[in-house]
Image (cartoon, helix red, strand yellow):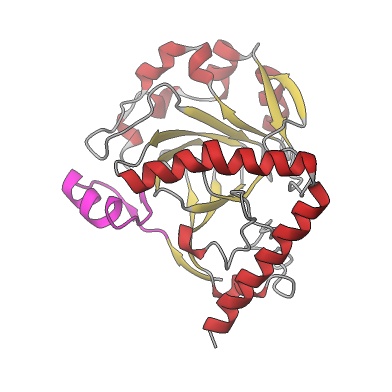
Amino acid sequence: MRLLPIEKIGEISDHEFKMNYYKPNKPVVLTQLAKKWPAYQKWNWDYFKNIVGDKQVGIYNNTKSDAYTPVNKADDYISFGDYIDMVRKGPAEWRIFLFNIFSHAPQITRDFIWPENLMKGFVKRAPMLFVGGSTSITHMHFDIDMSHILHTQFAGRKKVLMFPYNEQYKLYRKPFEVLSMADFSNYHQENGKPDYEKFPAIKLANGYEVTLDHGDTLFMPAGYWHHMEYIDSGFAMSLRAVQRNIPGLAKGVWNLLGMRNIDTLMKKTAPHWWYDFKKEKIYKAAEKELAYSK
């Protein structure tokens, strides 16, 4: 992989952000944005346990989904309070995916400010909390709705690996899915993945990496592939903004209403044929990328 560090910037004008990052679809970390919010000091494990500790949440392990595993299906259910107690004790390969804490405690939406000076189109009904124990992993994927994301880390540290959307064939994207066939777990460690013998085109992929700390806000442009590993137990909030152009909107709608439904139908009706068909297309696309590089 050919990786560059994601730039971290403190104060930045609206114009600079739009011209240097938003319009060119380039990721950046804003280190001062969230520090102006009450949430920066207020949000912690005890605060959340007190207000929503009794709520049941789906939790996910580190197992990477295969051709027959339902996408986004929780591996277990637990109260949020019990989950917090578990991850506080140390390494825990369990994470919470798309927890809409705000629907249970709408008052906490007053703890942050929608940064509409930076971009428009925020989906205000659906800010989401992402929570993970130390060593938990969010595997390589891109967001199906093709929205821009502002992802703010509020507790713990998280390592993030990112690639532009157009690197998809080097990443062995599964057709009709938002997932990579390759496993990037612990990619930064000596014994980590991916398996370059099995997935050689990944060596050609051009991407970025960064470690997010408390108060860091990552701007993730629409369609960016991302893989996240929790160094410490922690949580982050994502604010989503839909693309404000017809091609971007159309792609998101197709992914949600067309692509996903076709994949679900085929997995139910012809799972083995569908898997073999997609695997063949994955490797053919990767072989073309390898050929272009010679």
Query: Which quadrant holds residue 287?
Result: bottom right
**Observer able to see residue 191:** yes
**Observer able to see residue 91:** no
Work out which residue is located at the far bottom of the displayed protein and give it. Answer: 294
Query: What percent of the width, then of the height, locates residue 236?
Result: 50, 35
Q: Work out whether residue 78 or residue 11 is closer to the camera in this orientation and state it.
A: 78
Query: What percent of the width, then of the height, locates residue 158?
Result: 55, 46
Quadrant in which the C terminus appears: bottom right
**Residue located at (22% from left, 36% from top):** 117
Taking the magenta stretch, the answer to whether it contains residue 24 is yes
**Residue located at (53% from left, 49% from top):** 142
Query: What percent of the width, then of the height, locates residue 264?
Result: 69, 39
Left or right of 120 in this view: 171: right
**Residue located at (44% from left, 12% from top):** 106
Taking the magenta stretch, the answer to whether it contains residue 282 is no
**Residue located at (67% from left, 30% from top):** 88
Query: What percent of the width, then of the height, locates residue 263?
Result: 66, 44
Magenta stretch, residue numbers: 6-30
Q: Work out whether residue 52 or residue 119 is closer to the camera in this orientation and state it.
A: 119
Query: Which quadrant holds residue 21?
Result: bottom left
Work out which residue is located at the far right of the displayed protein and give it. Answer: 272
Quadrant in which the N terminus appears: bottom right
Q: Work out whether residue 17 or residue 33 is closer to the camera in this orientation and state it.
A: 17
Work out which residue is located at the far front of the displayed protein and give it. Answer: 269
Left or right of 89 in this view: 138: left
